[in-house]
Amino acid sequence: MELAPMPVYDCPFCTIVRGETEAEIVHEWSDAVAFVPLNPVTPGHVLVVPRVHVADVGHDPEVSAMTMRRAAELAAETHCNVITSRGAVATQTIFHLHYHVVPRREGDALSLPWDVR
């Protein structure tokens, strides 16, 4: 029995995972990759994405949990926010599951979207 080929997605994070788009990779696992986003909001800000294409945190609970585990490994090294969004209304702009690991420092003045203004 021949297996169907894995679909190839043209999303920006899939092209990074496949090595077709340059990115500053900070950590790799067999199932996920961590890299610096185009516009990091603090020093050390990284995105953790699964190697398989999953649209968002609600799409595949197993992949979401595995990817969060990898984000948690990086989060254990610093005080940080770990953030993900699901859907455009929730500010998701790239529809490939990703967790932001955003290191925080005393007095960094980073304002999160849900801060009272």
Image: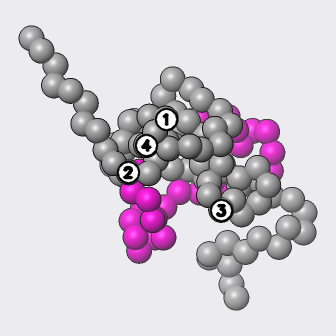
- On the image, which quarter does residue 35 sit in? top right
- On the image, which quarter does residue 2 sit in? top left
Direction left: furthest residue:
1
Identified at 44% across, 34% down, the residue is: 18
Real-space Cα distance between discs 4 and 2? 6 Å
**What amino acid does circle 1 point to?**
Gly
Identified at 9% across, 11% down, the residue is: 1
Q: Which residue is mark 1?
A: 19
**What amino acid does circle 2 point to?**
Cys
Real-space Cα distance between discs 3 and 2? 18 Å
Q: Earlier in the sequence, mark 3 or mark 2?
A: 2
Q: Is residue 75 visible?
A: yes
Real-space Cα distance between discs 3 and 4? 18 Å
82 left or right, relative to 104? left
Return the residue nearer the eye: 27 or 115.
Answer: 27
Q: Which residue is mark 4?
A: 15
Q: Which residue is mark 3?
A: 39
